[in-house]
Amino acid sequence: MITFSTEQAEFRRSVTRFVDAEVVPQADALDERGEFPRELVKKLGAQGWLALRYPEAYGGADADMVTYCLFAEELARGSLSVAAAAAMQSLMGTRFVYKYGSETLRAKYLVPALRGDLIATFALTEPNAGSDVANITTRADRRGDGWVLRGTKTWVTSAPVADVLTVAAKTGGGRGLGNIALFLLDRASMRGITLGKSIEKMAVRASVTGEIVLEDVEVPEAHCLGGEAGGVEKIGEILAEIRVMTAALSVGLARAAYEAALAYSRQRVAFGKPIGEHQAIGFKLADMLTALQAATLMTYQTAARLDAGRPIAREAAMAKLFASETAVRITDDAARIFASYGLAMEYPVQRYFRDARFLLPGGGTSEILRLVISRELDWDRWSAFA
Ligand SMILES: Cc1cc2nc3c(=O)[nH]c(=O)nc-3n(C[C@H](O)[C@H](O)[C@H](O)COP(=O)(O)OP(=O)(O)OC[C@H]3O[C@@H](n4cnc5c(N)ncnc54)[C@H](O)[C@@H]3O)c2cc1C
């Protein structure tokens, strides 16, 4: 059973109120324009919510993973685009400068990013390397006291608006995971960072995405975060967190779609009664609610395990796999219940249906997650009840 503490429940109510007042009313318009929600990111920063997982010294709340998931879920219920932008800002885009950066770098980049004043992102993926991280070809070579970076990153969240980027690059030759390092790049002060093509998407359109081209970018030694190797291990340290957070995003989106479908099934009449009273639709809603319940339980159980310091690599992969696939199914079912109106731009159901696709590759594709889970198949190793 999941029970939230009084503080967690109160926090959720605050985020719910904010999302209903500030996010829901503009979610469709932001999506239609494909516009980065800069003002909303600032407001989330002003609330202190982008800094939830960081210490108070940096404006944070030292919040647990359950609380962070409540934030991600509620935000995704209003707009998955806004939630995706906030997730980048509050986790992948800022975690490495916090963990491995000097106090000078933290003051200059981390604190403003957590306030929403600087846009931060994380760039690992390349045109020829997505799941296969060992295949990245972006190079970091020593020059004088620092480094020079060359390469192309793609599918970078917030790329067109990003001020500061954590970039993965190889410090040695050949394939392999051992020689990857993380570098903090400042778009304003470092020459050679240009925006490649901007990627037009059908999902999370307001979480803008693009390519970043690095041409002989000179990077000081202090911006090499945590040494010239071990980048993959550093990413691995937050992978479970990324997956559990993505599961929470999936639950939020699925809940929005379920609630919209339920309301519509009560109001839309066919053959003399609300469509929800036709057994086929009632059963569909029953399956949707059952799957939503299971995804929610898995997500928060895994978040609680993380908070308890227990091993969760397999559980995080299972939660993300199940919750994201559930969101895809529930948003599809919701669109079916709306029938023709599921295609109409005047209802958000078409947005939910499109946005759900983002959840599949983010944090590892379903195939990669099954690989992770299949390496740990013993039931009694990490029992669900342990
Ligand atoms: C909206 C959006 C935002 C993103 N933001 C960022 C970002 O900010 N920073 C960043 O670095 N990346 C980002 N990504 C990229 C994302 O992390 C990658 O797309 C993801 O890692 C998958 O890589 P790929 O698309 O190149 O697919 P590929 O790795 O080429 O996979 C293609 C297919 O092959 C399958 N496959 C691959 N390897 C195996 C295997 N060993 N066994 C079985 N099947 C396999 C995959 O599951 C998939 O079905 C973003 C992606 C999206 C859609």
Image (cartoon, rainbow, N blue to C red):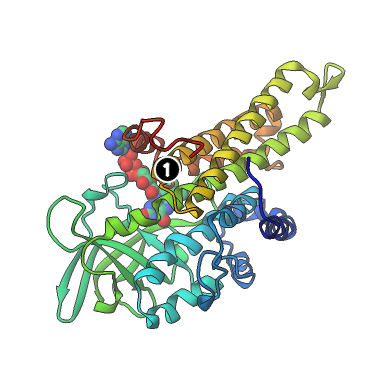
Residue 249 in percent (x, y) is at 56, 47
Residue 63 in percent (x, y) is at 56, 63
Q: Is residue 4 above or below residue 145?
A: above
Residue at the location (44% across, 49% down)? 310
Query: Is any part of residue 154 visible from this angle?
Result: no
> Does the Cβ of the disc 1 residue fall within 8 Å of ligand 1?
yes
**Residue 121 appears left or right of 227:** right
Residue at the location (35% across, 80% down)? 189
Residue at the location (42% across, 43% down)? 361
**Furthest-right residue in view?**
272
Q: Secondary structure at mark 1?
A: loop
**Residue 153 appears left or right of 173:** right
What residue type is disc 1 on? Pro
At label 1, counting other C-alpha atoms closer than 10 Å, the crowd grade (few under 14, some 14-19, many 20 or more) is: some
Picture quarter with ligand 1: top left
Image quadrant occupied by the N terminus: top right
Residue 145 in percent (x, y) is at 18, 81
Query: Is any part of residue 287 visible from this angle?
Result: yes
Residue at the location (51% across, 45% down)? 302
**Residue 259 appears left or right of 96:** right
Q: Which residue is mark 1?
A: 361
